[in-house]
Image (cartoon, rainbow, N blue to C red):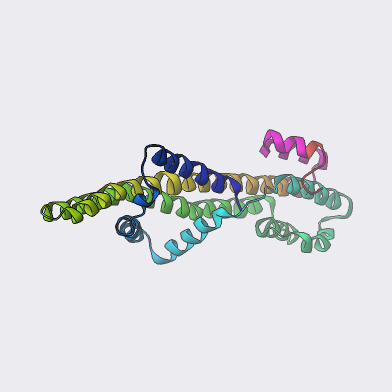
Amino acid sequence: MDIMIFLGVVVSLAGVLGGQALEGGSVSSLLQPTAAMIVYMGALGATMVQFTLPNFKYACKVVFAVIKAHPDHSVEYIHKIVEYSTVVRKEGILAMEKKMEEVKDPFFKKGLQLLLDGTEPRVLREILETEVGMHEEYFELAPKLCDAYGGYLPTFGIIGAVLGLIVVMQNLSNPDLIGAGIAVAFVATIYGLIGANLICLPIGNKLKTQAKEHGAVCLMIVEGLMSMAAGENPRLTQEKLEGFLTEENKKKLAAGGGGH
């Protein structure tokens, strides 16, 4: 699990609920099923209108997968590329057949297979870069889903507030219903703002960051394969690929970490 999502939600809710308690309010007063139904189901319906069914299902799958930890394999892949480059220089490209089984990443494996099949370097780059571009474009559906849902939530929070006030106005002669209506009105607004700013928009931004990181790793693999196809010195290949790494990962690479 991505621990930062858990910690962030806990810290934020602790601040909101703790502040509510310090002001003398009751946490139970924030539990309004009616308000939750209006806000979250209403915003969900509006979001569904914006997407086709296949795109909506794919985006939901990616969003729910965000809670999983996503390990960084960039240093490991550089070690592998350098290792494979050494094999190719010494034994030829056909020697890579025995190495194919140990490659788990589908993109990396596809590139190696194309290289093994004798694909021209120019064509190899075009195929792989096209795949990277299409993957990034399709992956953007998940952040767009979060942005859309997060954008609609405050609006439906206002709708819930208005509906609550309508109930109040219709029952001015009944004090019991007035209190319930006002509670729904204010809590609906809170639900909309919290759902948008604590869940949807932060997760959408996290997904955008993950997409950029994945795209950078894929482009690093492409450059590594091109160096391998050109028969470049493995040491030179490693130095070239270091440019894709963060400072922390450069230190890992220098120390021989990352799965080497």
Residue 229 percent location from the top left of the image: 75, 50
What residue lies at 74% left-to-right and 49% top-to-bottom? 77
| Residue lying farthest to the top in this orientation | 247
Is residue 239 or residue 5 the one in the foreground? Answer: 5
Q: Give the image location of residue 19, x and y in percent.
A: 42, 38
Q: For this view, does 126 lie left or right of residue 41?
A: right
Q: Residue 243: in sight, yes or no?
A: yes
Residue furthest to the right in view is 90
The residue lying toward the viewer, choosing from 64 and 98, is: 64
From the image, give the main secondary structure of the stretch colored magenta. Answer: helix
Residue 25 in which image quadrant: top left
Magenta span contains residue 69 = no
For the point 20% across and 54% down, which residue is it?
Answer: 163
Q: What stretch is highlighted in magenta?
A: 229-252
- In the rendered picture of this protein, how many numbered marks are placed on residues? 0
Q: Choose between 75 and 46: the one closer to the eye.
A: 46
Q: Residue at x 38, y 49 (%)?
A: 150
Point out residue 12 in the picture as x, y percentages from the top left corner: 47, 42
Residue 17 location (% of width, % of height): 43, 43
- Residue sitting at 81 percent across and 49 percent down? 85
Instruction: Determine whether, in the image, residue 205 is placed left or right of residue 91.
Output: left
- Which one is in front, 240 or 43? 43
Q: Is residue 233 visible?
A: no
Q: Is 236 placed left or right of 152 in the picture? A: right
**Is residue 231 located in the magenta-colored stretch of the structure?**
yes
